[in-house]
Structures are given as C-alpha cells and as structure tokens.
Amino acid sequence: MFDGLGTTIKDLARLSNAKSRSICMENRTGEKGAGGMATEGTGAACARDLGKGWKVSPSALLRPGEIFTMADYRGSGAIEHIWMTCHYSKWRSLVWKIYWDDETQPSVLVPVGDFFCNGWNERANVSSLPIAVNPSGGFNCYFEMPFRKGFRMEMQNLSDEEVYLYYQIDFIETEVSDDYAYFHASFNRTAAHDPQKDIVIADRILGRGQYVGTYLAWQVNNNGWWGEGEVKFFIDGDTDYPTICGTGTEDYFGGAWNWEQPAGEYGTYSTAYLGMHQVIKPDGLYRANMRFGMYRWHIRDAVRFEHDLRVTIQDLGWRSGGRYLVQNSDVSATAFWYQTEPHAPLAEMQRDKLENI
C-alpha cells in the first residue's frame, strides 16, 4: 500500500497506512487526541472566561538566549509542512536547528528569516513550491523531510529581548525506505572577502545526495550593475574548475539583462522555482545600500553528487572600458540539499555576524 511519502495531486485519491500527526504549542507531543488540552500558556488570560480547549497555548515565549525545543518526536515518518511566524525584527536573531534520528549535530542550522527567503528583517511575499511567505509574515515550508528514528527541532533566541513564536509542524507516521536521504540547510555570510576568491554558498557537503536550492540576501556596496558573477558547482572531487558553471547571477535565478524591467527599475518576481522577490532601496538617510533577495529551487534539475559538493558564486560587476570589476558585496547564502548521514558539522551562529547593518 502507498506509504504516503512524496504525495502529489495525482496521489490524493490513493489510500495509505500513513497516520497524520501535528505538533504545536496546543499539542507539544503530536499525540493522537491530545490537542487543545493546555491549561496554561500565552493565551490563558484571553481564555479565562472560556477555559480549557479555547486557545490557551497558541505560542511560545522565548527568553533572551534561550534554546527552545519546538518538537522532540520518536518514530519513523516525514515532515510534510511547517508553518511559523514571529515578529519580523527577530528574523535574523532566531536560529532554527533540526536534528534527525540520534544526531548530536544539527542538519539544519539557519536564521529563520533566511530559511524562508526573508533575510533582511523586512517582509517580502514568496510564492514558490517549497517555500511560501504570505501576509503578514506567515512562513510555510513544503520540503519533505523524512526521518527513521525521530527528530528534534529547536529555535535559539540570540536577541536580548523576549520573542513570541507561533508554529505548527505537520507530519506523517510511516515507514521510510532506504533510498530516502535527509534534508539539510546551511547558512554562510560573506561580508568581506578575498577579491581573488569566490563567495561560498555551500562548502564541505560530504556524503551522497542532491542539492535542491539557493537563497541569497545580497547587499551591493558599489555603483553600477553588480550581477555578472557565475554560480559554480564543484562535484565529486572537482578542484580548480567546476563541473557546472553558470553565465551570470540573474541568469542563475531565471532572469536576464540585469532584471531591468521597466527601464530604469528592477522587476521583481516570485515563481514556483525561481524568484528575485525583494528589492530594498536606499532612503537617503540611514539606509545606504541596495539590498536584494533571490531564490532558485532545483526541483526539476537537482544537482546530484556521490561523495562531495561545493557551491560558490563570483562577486562581479563592471568598471570602465568594458572590464569586469571584482566587488566586495555583503552576501548571505542559504543552501538546501538532501544527503546520506553523517554530514559535516555546520557552522554555529554568532549574533554580531548576523546583524543587518
């Protein structure tokens, strides 16, 4: 019988032995028949006239510096959908971590805003297949995330203030066959770099799997067109030269000719697989630079590797005489992939390195 994994619209009529479960602050364990039973929580005062079962615990309150356990589930299955929201000012100071099975090192380690293609602490809607961001800051993830023994999900509050976090994790209990890999996501910020080296999007991916997505939050620190840099995939032992090499930044994200449409303006877009969905302009006072948000999902064109992968992008613009200019942009890269375990350790987050200044 159908195991419930990889469900598409053509599978909706198929019967399955998979069991639907969900974890949120109204059901911390995902246990059957245990939702809405809280007697204490962030909504207790609002529900004082109604009592148990009336939205007593809709959110979590994260203290400064706290690592909050969103879920700790034991069993076999797959996460199918995640929804969450918090105040936009904290999107770079909340760090999301996911551990699969019995891992001690997280497979996902990314600021929550960057995971959902909103790395600048300013709301931008996203209408794509795996990531949807809806008014006003509703984060949705549809990447399938299989597990065999369980998963643990944490949110670390690096800010000096309390943060309210609302979330729901929808998953199924089912058997997972050997040919399913584990979901991973990493973050890397390059605020200053050696002009002779490419900016790293993903490094030291060790194992077998497939690369499935890129999000970049890009701050331009010079005038002129800035997106001539090529995206490169160094696959299975590539050293100086990659197996896959693109032709330009806007080309990789599915655009063309500097994204200039209409003339003199950047044209934004958000589609199923590709987007340049955010343009933040200088305000003539404290906001000094152009900032952009862009994504690409390799859903129909996953980049497959047998034992290692490295992904980079050049920081390249123009100077006089039709010559390329090696720039010094501020680029934050989030990489998404599936792979076998174990994986190489991901870099821990430091608050000062995450600040949008």
Image: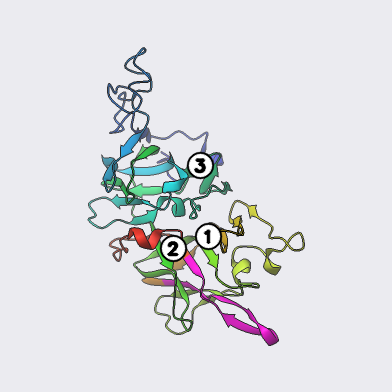
Camera-near label (2 vs 3) is: 3
* Residue range (magenta): 310-331
Residue beneath label 3, please? 137
Report crowding for label 1: few under 14, some 14 to 19, many 20 or more residues within 10 A (C-alpha): some
Observer able to see residue 176? yes
Prevailing secondary structure class for the magenta stretch in the rendered image: strand
- Image: 198 above or below 77: below
- Image: 303 above or below 127: below
C-alpha gap between disc 1 and disc 2 = 9 Å
Observer able to see residue 181? no
Residue at far right of view: 263
Residue beneath label 1, please? 298
- Residue 99 location (% of width, % of height): 29, 51
Report crowding for label 2: few under 14, some 14 to 19, many 20 or more residues within 10 A (C-alpha): many
Disc 1 or 2, which lies upstream in sequence?
Answer: 2
Q: Nearer the viewer, residue 226 or 141?
A: 226
